[in-house]
């Protein structure tokens, strides 16, 4: 039994609904994903093309001769990955879901370019945004409230 899960970009222009059948996800560490996202790795949920519908279509760019990636030209996030042909599936970035909390990483891909220092960060100091007064002050000065 699939759950309907919604998501989209930061500004809200691109929106999707996906039928999600399980919580399995993965981290891709390949250099192309690192370059395309600006992140040391990117968390993806693989979905069947027939299980995702775009309420507002994303923009797409050719990221290599074999693949293209959806994004929003207004606010810039990486929304996924898709092969140009020969696949009935695509990846959706975990954090573009409205509630990314259910997904669990089940494997690493692109293992040849894993940056090991970023894999296990347990034990590092943790700071909350709502405890960062200078950040709160900027929000309150600009908008009258803190969104965190
Ligand atoms: Zn946007």
Image: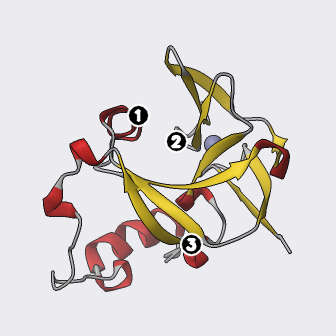
Left or right, 117 with reference to 122: left
Q: Vertical placement of 2 versus 75: above or below?
A: below
| Label 3–label 2 contact, CB within 8 A | no
Q: Vertical placement of 103 versus 55: above or below?
A: below
User: Mark 3 Cα within 10 Å, few/some/many (few <14, many 20+)?
Assistant: some
Q: Vertical placement of 4 versus 82: above or below?
A: below
Q: CA distance from mark 2 to mark 1?
A: 7 Å
Q: Which mark is residue 78?
A: 2
Locate residue 63, reporting x and y percent: 49, 22
Residue sitting at 75 percent across and 68 percent down? 21
Front residue of 14 and 94 = 94
Can you tell which of label 1 and label 3 is closer to the viewer?
3
| Label 2–label 1 contact, CB within 8 A | yes
Mark 1 = which residue? 36
Residue sitting at 50 percent across and 13 percent down? 65
Q: Which mark is residue 103?
A: 3
Q: Residue furthest top?
A: 65
Locate residue 125, reporting x and y percent: 16, 83
Q: Which of the two discs, 1 and 3, labels the residue nearer the N terminus?
A: 1
Left or right, 34 with reference to 140: left
Ligand 1 under 8 Å from disc 3 Cβ? no
Q: Which of the two discs, 2 and 1, labels the residue nearer the N terminus?
A: 1
Locate residue 14, reporting x and y percent: 72, 43
Q: CA distance from mark 3 to mark 2?
A: 18 Å
């Amino acid at each position: 039994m699939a759950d309907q899960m919604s998501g989209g970009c930061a500004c809200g222009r691109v929106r999707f609904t996906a039928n999600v059948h399980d919580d399995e996800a993965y981290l891709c560490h390949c250099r192309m994903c690192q370059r395309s996202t600006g992140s040391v790795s990117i968390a993806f949920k693989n979905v069947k093309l027939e299980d995702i519908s775009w309420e507002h279509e994303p923009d797409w760019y050719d990221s290599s001769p074999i693949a293209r990636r959806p994004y929003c030209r207004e606010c810039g996030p990486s929304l996924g990955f898709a092969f140009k042909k020969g696949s009935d599936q695509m990846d959706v970035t975990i954090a573009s879901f409205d509630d990314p909390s259910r997904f669990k990483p089940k494997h690493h891909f692109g293992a040849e370019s894993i940056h090991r220092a970023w894999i296990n960060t347990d034990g590092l100091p943790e700071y909350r945004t709502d405890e960062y007064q200078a950040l709160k002050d900027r929000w309150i000065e600009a908008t009258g409230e803190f969104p965190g």
